[in-house]
Every structure is written in C-alpha cells, then in structure tokens.
Image: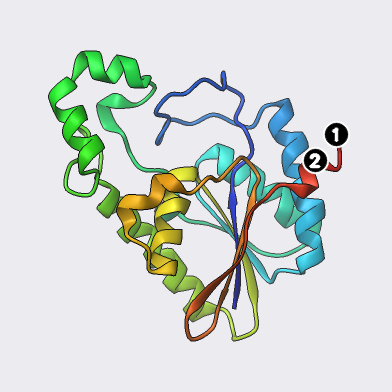
Amino acid sequence: MRLLLVRHAPAGWPQEPRYRGWSDAPLGEEGLRAARLLARRVAEEAPDAVYASDLSRASGTAREVSSRLGVPLHLRGGLREMAFGEWEGLSHREVLGRDPERYRRWLVDPFGTAPPGGESAAACLARAWEVLEEIRESLPAGSSAVVVSHGGTLRLLLCRLLGMPPANHFRLRLDYCGITTVDWESEPVLSGLNDLSHLRCAR
C-alpha cells in the first residue's frame, strides 16, 4: 500500500505561530489555490481513497482532491491535530507567561504531559494510528490512499511508521500541502518527504 501523507493547505486566519489544535477555520484564498495545485499533483498517483481530519482546514483541502479525482472522501476525527485545551489560540510566549511550569514540563515530555483540558502527544498518536490501521484493513493490497491531516499529527505518525523515537518528531519538517510518501508492505519505507514541487512550479 502507498500512503500519501499531506499537511492541509493554509487556513484563512493570520499565519502567525500559535497553537491552533482543534480551533477551526476554513481555507483562505491562498489555501484554496494550494489545495487545487495539490489535487492536480495527486491525480498523477491515482489514489483509491482520500482520508482526512474533519477540521475545516483539512477537510476543505481533501475535498479539492476528492472532487477532482472522483474518489471517496472519508472524514475521521482521529486525524485531528493535537488538542491544546486552554492553550488553543495562544502563542509560545503567551503560554509561557500564563502557565510556565506546566508548559516547560510539556516541552520536555509531551507524551507524558498534556495541556490543561487538552491531550498528550501519546493520546493524539493513538487515535491517529487507529485510522491508519483502518485504511490498511479496508483497502486491498496494492492500493493507495491520500491522508490529509495536520503537522503535529503527521509527524507523530511518521515517527511510528519509520521506527523513530517519537520525541524526535519536531525534527521532521512538513509544510502546507507538502506530500510525504510511505510505501507500506511488510515494513513501511519512506519514499518521499515534504514534496512541494507542485506548488513551486506554479509560481
């Protein structure tokens, strides 16, 4: 099976560094353009299905792909970004000022610590992994699927797929609409990381 892991297109909010998590916003004009270029590129892979987070920035990206290719779209809450609870919408500096002790613990151990009202990285990975297992069980061997999710969730999934220490997930760069390809037979193999050629060629 081939998995095309895609970080969603930019949402229509200011693109400043903040913990967005489960906050929701549709794609902006730039995001729609990027999603259409992504759909054109993914069409070359002839995927059998598209799976996506049910948050608008991911589902909107996935719908552009699904509609262009005429393949089924499956929305799954398990593919959402990590839930940041009371830290939703805040910047690094703001969280550090409001909740310094817990924030420092979370930065050191995001798997054993969760934001107040949010979830740990371990919980995020567990629910997202269930969706990958569903894809493996529901599609026949030799199939391919597009998986549109979020930066943090996809980095965690990649670490597990490749047998990497999950604490290293921040060392993986995944840009908006970047395509990461994993060929999953007996063992997952990384065939491409953060491909943005479809966006650069259109500039």
**Mark carried by residue 203:** 1
Q: Residue at x 42, y 43 (%)?
A: 81
Q: In which quarter of the image is residue 28?
A: top right
Task: Report, in whole angstroms, how far the alpha carbon at label 2 lies from the one at label 1.
Answer: 6 Å
For this rendering, which residue is in front, 64 or 9? Answer: 9
Q: How many labels does the image show?
A: 2
Residue designated by label 2: 200
Q: Where is residue 96 in the image (x, y as percent from the top left)?
A: 25, 19
Q: Measuring from the top left, give residue 75's x and y in whole percent.
A: 53, 55
Q: Position of residue 187 (x, y in %)?
A: 47, 81
User: Residue 26 placed where, x, y %?
Assistant: 60, 31
Amino acid type, residue under disc 2 in the picture? Arg
* Residue closer to the observer: 73 or 43: 43
Q: In which quarter of the image is residue 126?
A: bottom left
Question: Label for residue 83?
Answer: none
Q: Quadrant of the N terminus?
A: bottom right
Residue 193 image-quadrant placement: bottom right
Q: What element carries label 2?
A: helix
Residue 6 horizontal side relative to residue 35, left or right:
left
Q: Are marks 2 and 1 in contact (CB under 8 Å)?
A: yes
Identified by mark 1, the residue type is Arg
Is disc 2 surrounded by few (<14), some (14 to 19) or many (20+) residues within 10 Å? few
